[in-house]
Image: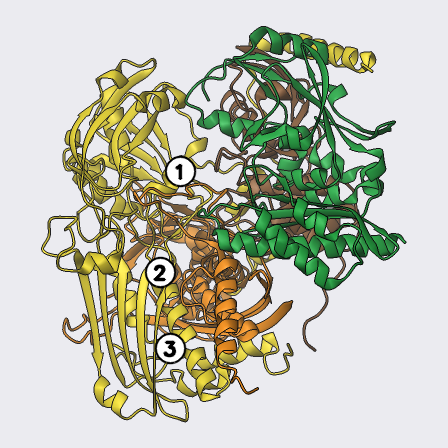
Amino acid sequence: MVDEVKVAEKTEKLESLRKIDDNLRLPSVPERIAFPKEIGVSAARMQTPAVGQRATRPDGRMHGLGQTKYIDDMFFPGMIHAKIKRAGIAHAKIKSIDVSEAEKMPGVMATLIGSEIPVNSFGPSLQDQPLLADDVVRHAGDGVAAVAAVTEQQALDALDKIKIEYEELPNVFDPVEAMKENAYKIHNNESNVYATKTIMKGDVEKGFADSNFIFERTFTTQMVEHVPMEPHASIGQWDANGRVTLHSSLGRITLGRADIARTLELPINRVRVIATIVGGNFGGKNEITTEPIIALLSKKTGRPVKCVFTREDEFISSTTRHPFVMEYKTGMSKEGKIMARKVRLICDGGAYCSWSETTLGKACILSAGPYNIENLHVDAYAVYTTKTMTGAMRGFGAPQVCFAYESHMDDMAAELGIEPLEIRLQNAFNEGSASPTGQVLEAVVVRDSLEMATERFGWKEWQR
Amino acid sequence: MIRRGKGVGCMWYPIGFTVAANPSAATVKVNEDGTATLLTGTVETGQGSLTVLAQIAAEELGVSTDDIHVVSADTDTTPMDTGAIASRTTYVTGNAIKLAAENAKKILFEVAAPLLDVQPNQLEAVDRKIQVQYFPQRCLPIADVALQAQFVMGRPPIGSASYNPPTVGMDPETGQGKPFSTYVYATQCAEVEVDDETGEVDVIYMSAAHDCGTAINPMLVEGQIEGGISMGIGFALQEEMLFDDKGRQLNPNLTNYIMPTSLDMPEIDVDIVENFDPTGPFGAKGVGEPTAVPTAAAICNAIFDAVGVRITSLPATAEKVLRAIKEKNNSEQKFIPAAE
Amino acid sequence: MTDIALIVNGENKTVSVPPETTLLKMLRENLNYTGSKLGCDVGDCGACTVLVDGLAVNACLILAAQAEGKEVLTIEGLSTLEKYHPIQKAFEDVAALQCGFCGPGMIMATKALIDQDQDLTKQEIKDALSGNLCRCTGYTKIIEGVVDAYQEITGKKIPATKPRVA
Amino acid sequence: MKPFDFIQPTTIDAAILALAEHNPNVRILNGGTDYLVELKHAAQSPGVVVDVSRLQDLRGIEIIDAGLRIGAGTTHTEIMADPLVKEYVPAMIDAAHTVGAVQTRNLGTLGGNLVTCVPSMDSGPTLLALDAKVIILGSKGTRQSSLTDFFIGPRRTSLEPDELLLEIIIPKENLGKPASFIKFGLRKGQALALVNAASALWVEGNKFKDVRIALGAVAPVVMRATKAEALLEGRVISEDLVQEAAKIAVGEAKPIDDFRASKEYRNDLIEVGTRRTLQAALTASNIKN
């Protein structure tokens, strides 16, 4: 049954391949960079006026040719690789960290722990997050130590040799539980509630009293990850003038630079951040992650240091979308006009503040929906829990509250026997409507969008 | 049995940060051949912002998109920018760029005016020319003016500017204030098929009508909307980070964290609602985030329409939908009077 | 170390790597073909899709040594100095790629599909791309790009999907 | 990945010798779509890895005396495109089609899918419903095994470290037997099975004959729902009977509760899956006749 001929052919082919390549082996031949010499430009790019054109993207061409250099595609002479040890335990006091065994591992060039970082805290509104936890671990993805080694595998192998003694602390996973007075205080504050927002407009109680029907419903949403296809990555290079250059997948470099300079106690002009192209952000790459760590590892080793998140790092240690608990109470007239609405939002803020305050603020303002509501009361709370931190993500709380207010709307429409499109048109903002914060709105096109989307859908003709 | 339903979700969304300053700065350098280089500190994260920003600079200078080269994302060489966040790039950075280009153009107009025998404020930049308003026959190629400015007049046409959206702080007690400069509006409609034996939800069609002010590049706006919908579908039906009782994530990988694949995407029709915001660059606002906002609402409303169950906790997994259907059936049976 | 002789983008190569080296790692680090991306390293995302003897595979799930003697085509081998590949052109024209990280994998999966020379439907295109995750585009413009490229390359038409409510 | 020694035999005999020589610190690599993932996460080196992906003799689909022989190294893509499979066991095409995505199917092999022996394997139910046999070669010789004996537990088979799965044989009497496969996952593309099921049956007159129902992801290994089969055997075909069999199948399975789905939901899917595959097999039978 053995196909002798086939096997022989294969061997011959291999041999000939080897022979041909022997000639090439000595001088290293640079790889061919294959791109067409002359590609035209789409007409839309050449047109004036420029606005409104379906202009093609020069960067899009590079992506398609595989020529775009993302951070992980960059290699510098002498570059080594860093990996981060994750706590793997959600809430604990760190009693000791021993990196001595790890340092003896083959290929390891340096280690770093939190206490070696000049200012080991950062965050866009509250600086409550350590770069590497040195005192308390507050979620399982918290970094506790870093290793730089010649190869990624050596760095990974060394992580296993880091010894950390923990003293477990109580976990608080549920934001509603975390709000309670007797809940364990994750940041030693008076309360786990670290941000509150309120909106009051009109008189809600009177509005409910004037309503024909009152509807109440609680909605919840889940924790979601951004999943950019490119995991977080950065390369740090410390130079002889005490300047550090960071190639990073950061989406906001100017503010990132300030954070990095602050943690490293460097003047801002000694930090350079280059972001090239980010392989997907969605809010997840708006904060520094490992940049100061690799800057310090580069300083320690005198080499460029690269750190690329594994997909697991990406999930457990980067920010995520806030889970929300949303209690809605709405008073309606029998004709379907919203008379009053009361909303209570509890936002699971995870282990650190990150962008929670912003998220809470937007969610709070938007929670009434694009509808005229004269009597409104919204209370919103961001709460610490011992889970992966939540932060900026496409929509800052808006997808959560929109799910709630629009589901609620259809519930009420069904009860009142009003068609879903009609009830929306009846309550939607008009030109000059006052927003929940009293802002006079201009260029309002809620109705236009409702009519366009439903017309395209074939809403009225649609049959089950 | 497969049951079909339709649902609608409507939303509003602000552009830029809540009250807090979120400025952008930009520099536009017109080269001596009439092309230009744009310096911006924003980062291209995939949305096509660099192309849109080039279009804004080009429009202001009266040249084509291809005449603009964009340099971005390097703190040593590019000016301050708050970054690719809060759907702010087209509006805030775009405004800064428009102002910067305006400043560069001002130099060109001042140089061209005596050559064309008019005042600078009588000029406009159109089709790579600097021409007299209402008398376009009198014109000079922008290249000639730029060359003249740089080498004869010694005034390189470079303009810099910054922009920060105007807001009014919110009252801490009542939240009253003007937290944002502007808002966008959108509606999405979903058609779903629900298998009432398994709870599986198949989104088969979505229409989306989004306001973004002027669409600087409609093709890229469509791309944002379609992408936002996919993220919205994941949020509505599939995605969830799950933890064990010790707080460790159970599904930290793309095998078990379920996000939409090409097979999970419906047919999508996108419409851009015509609108013009006088405060935005050429009437533009933004579109990035809002695209992911109303999708889950539309889908859950369509599920409600199809099988009569209200999903109150996302994601609306097949398991949850089936459980809700069973609960509904059970409670309906309970209410059937014994006599019947 | 194992010596591996293979053909990459039409050129003979011999590379010496440890046996546990994946094809992806070898392409990126030993041969500097960084077009194929590492997105998950376990075959879920498809960003590392390359063609091995014409078949689309995840380069992270095949050892370099398993590719010995085979022909590997990466994104860098698609266009030539003279010719812009129609798939890449179609993707550019419809702005199919946003952040672009999934792009090389998407394009290689598309190449494998179109090379099969079969009559395709939109559903079959979606099926062929289901191993390539994309977070930016919702796949819509990517599929549009594939349809355009398919029609350009084969001269065939994709059957129109049935129109919605009249 | 931890370093390991790598052997690429060019003949099956050489592969068996290599396995025997390095037993027990030896593992077989073929398509690698599962094993390489395992290796990447492994804390220890496997020692020696024997790559059998070059063995042409492990591949191929042909009709032999015993039935349809499918080489263990045949990829899912090859199965999907094979005219013999299409003619005699079309349900296998549906099953192969649900394995991962194109990239997985181009590398992943039928043998690999069986040997990996995860409860949610997509090839298992159809093969079990068709009473497929596996042929195994070791240094002590060749042996044949039923799939029921072959599957021992999650990620455990009766394969010894020095043995190689050679081929899968679908018995002659079951070629062309009306069969159907269904899979329930958490999404449409690249899904792991929450539950999968396959049914195969003959229709004699208006009665069920030789009914086989196999369920995946509902027990430590892919299993037969023998009580449900027994209920149907020789009885007059009816919707009610199919429904009753589906309910019995639920009682036979022992699905787990995990983060992907609850036990209750899996039970619901078992019922629906069993019913739908039986109905589809009946439809296939009608079309045939």
Residue at mark 3: chain? A
Q: Quadrant of residue B118?
A: bottom left
The residue at the point 51 percent across, 67 percent down is B326
Q: Residues within 10 Å of mark 2 (few under 14, many from 20)?
A: many
Which residue bears the numbered disc 1? A312
Q: Amino acid at mark 2?
A: Arg
Which residue bears the numbered disc 3? A370
Along the line of sight, the residue nearer the viewer: D160 or A370:
D160
Q: Please say whether residue A339 is visible from this viewpoint.
A: yes
From the top left corner, tell me how far across and down residue A287 is, in percent: 29, 46
The residue at the point 69 percent across, 13 percent down is A17
- Foreground tag (3 vs 2): 3
In the rendered structure, the answer to whether residue A295 lies left or right of residue D240 reads left
Q: Residues within 10 Å of mark 1 (few under 14, many from 20)?
A: some
Q: Colour of chain D?
A: green
Question: Which element type, helix, strand or loop, lies under badge 3?
Answer: loop
CB contact under 8 Å: marks 3 and 1: no
Which residue bears the numbered disc 2? B88
Question: Which element type, helix, strand or loop, lies under badge 1?
Answer: helix
Q: Colour of chain B?
A: orange
- Foreground tag (1 vs 2): 1
